[in-house]
Amino acid sequence: MAAQRTRRENSACFVMAIGAIALSISVFGDEPKEYEITDADRDHWSFRSVARSMVPPVKNREWVRTPIDAFILAKLEQTGWQPNPPAEKRDLLRRMFLDLTGLPPTIEEQDRSLADDSPIAFERLIDDLLSRPSYGERWGRHWLDLVRYAETNGYERDGAKPSVWRYRDYVIDAFNADKPYDRFIVEQFAGDELPDAVTETVIATGFHRLGPFDDEPADFEQDRYDQLDDIIRTTSQAFLGITLGCARCHNHKFDPLTNHDYYRVAAVVNPLKRPLNGRTELDLPAGTLAQRAALMERDRRIDEIRKQISEVRDSIRSDFLASGKSALPAEAIAAFGIAPDKRMPPQKDLVARHSPQLEAELLAALPDDKRERVAELERQITSLREASPDLPRGYFMTESAEPPPKSFLLFRGQAAARGPEVPPAVPVVLTRESATISSPLSSHGTSGRRLAFARWMASASNPLTARVIVNRVWQYHFGDGLVRTPSDFGIIGEPPTHPELLDWLAHWFVHDANWSIKKLHRLILSSSTYQMSKSDHPTYGEQDPRNVNFWRFPYRRLEVEAIRDSMLSASGQLRRTMGGPGVYLEIPPEVLAGNSDPNVVWPKFDEAASSRRTVYAFVKRALVVPFLEVLDVCDTTRSTELRNRTTISTQALTLFNGDFTNRQAKHLAERLQREAGDNATRQIELAYRLTLGRSVVPSELATMQRFLADDAKSEDRRLKLEQLCRVILNLNEFMYPN
């Protein structure tokens, strides 16, 4: 046995040695020849130009509200199937609220909507929901999944990303304003290079900097290319639905994406630099190169003026301190008399504490001519600030006004193994014109490469961009996209279930909707396809368990954000403040117990401050809030096109026994007592309306009434009401709306 093991080990070593030699030859050998892209490569369905499909004829014309319905129904009729009947009006109402805003309808909204029998009642409701700020909070969160948003860097130190929350607020505001999607793309990829660049568009470029960042890498040059790789992978998947990152070390194994394609795109983003002070991440004034340069010049001039002010005050400082006119304590006066480099820590503390008072005394003691001189200098500072106001701080990468660095193909992705120089370009398979980017310097002094690439991505001629985003919007409404691999439209991705519908939507989105996502929502939600019930069908369910034909509306659990926000809304605790720095949700003490200083790692829990929408929760990569993690919050280390959909015991335990749910059950019980008094029937009816958006049925009412026995003591009854609320918040119907 020992001899056999030795032979195996020797054989393994020999194979490893041969592999190392082969790798060395591959890395440092001749330049690899680029694969030649052919018309056959471009014939893959997702690489073809988008053309408007013909709307198919159907037998059941009355079911067709929008062209979407014709495409769905035509396929069902081919198999002899029929779509599900429409959902109950109350169920559809709650579905739309949760889908568009992530919040349940209030009782007043339920009553108003259900009483509206107009033929266009749902269209009016859709417009109302799309106009609410909560729409941007709901749909902005979907986008943050795609761009790997987090507020820390990950890795061992997991340092905070300063001012990164402004990117999150930019996304929410963009959805609420219905910013055209083509503009949305360009702003994030090259907002600083736009001719009309402003603070908002510069903050948008924080997109490039959202990924994990190792602030103490073993190999700084290799880490630099790892950072570029993060940008390339996220860009190609989020915007284009292709896995270009797989071509970093070699030609893509399945798609016609070459090693050269990868490094041409790397050349586009290569001029970007990460602002750092040693290992510390920096934010910057959110402006263009020229604006930041103007601020630097302004601050330089202000510093010079402040020195002049100090010189005026210093001219009388010694005499004033010696005159006995100062009201400062004697020990403070003595401390000021010592040279700064000779002061001991206690004296430095005295100087720091009493400097404002001394400065005020010196100003009052100045002779008239010197006081007027100081006033004039202060006016100069005010004028400088008015001419160049401060800019909000933003978290983004920068380009310098210098010529962009040369870019090279790296053999096997190794920074130390440079191959030929490559120019900036787009993937060859996605264009029939020249792939090379012509990018004269932008009007702001940057390379212009990113702006040229972004405009190519956001052009109507790009075969992928519109297809990818309409598929994503469909996916978030229906649980699955028409393409069920939403970030991989390549060879091994799943083909579309309804290719003609996908192309019709993509063409309509660009040419009729002018890239408006809100118009796309209206089209989808107005359809009979969206308004179907979720009821099962024994034959259809057996033959099409994945609902590929969309014969019913899918049955799916809410995301953790909608679950948490719905609980806060029902209990009356939800704070609707928008924007600003992230809030810290509760983390159990036992989770923090292993840290040397738990309050530094995670601030002390403040229930009132944290009772905001979950999109504003502080996202720390190395310490995910357990409540969010157990309910499948997205992985922030990469672009997440589709969250995990698990059903596990820890979810039931967290939702039934966890502190958050129990706290909301207590608040909900208190709300029921305030608004319904001590009448058990009214309390139960109110609880169902607040949580499930419907009236309690007789069997449910009888069960709940027995639980809240009238002869119970008041204290016991209060606790029972809390437990009743906890049960309702854990009902399947609360998590899986109809």
Image (cartoon, rainbow, N blue to C red):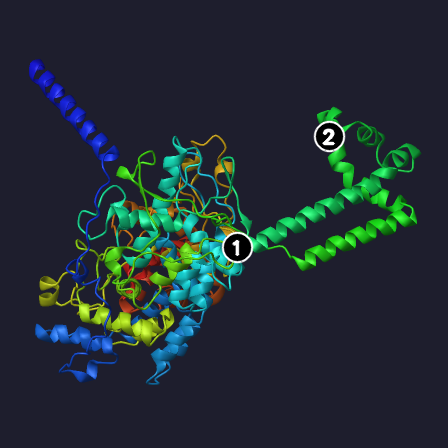
Q: Earlier in the sequence, mark 1 or mark 2?
A: 2
Which picture quadrant has residue 315?
Answer: top right
Q: Can you tell which of label 1 and label 2 is closer to the viewer? A: 2
**In the depicted structure, whether residue 609 falls above or below residue 733:** above
Residue type for callout 1: Gly
Q: Is residue 225 left or right of residue 25?
A: right
Q: Amino acid at mark 2?
A: Lys
Q: Is residue 278 left or right of residue 624?
A: right
Residues at marks 1 and 2 touching, judged by CB atoms closer than 8 Å: no
In the rendering, which numbered label is found on residue 580? Answer: 1
At x 75% / y 26%, what residue is drawn?
A: 343
The answer to whether residue 424 of the structure is visible from this angle is yes
Q: Please, what secondary structure does the residue beneath circle 2 have? A: helix
- Determine the image quadrant of residue 530: bottom left
- Which residue is tagged 2? 348
| Residue 327 in sight here | no
Q: Position of residue 586 (x, y in %)?
A: 45, 45
User: Which quadrant is the C terminus positioned in?
Assistant: bottom left
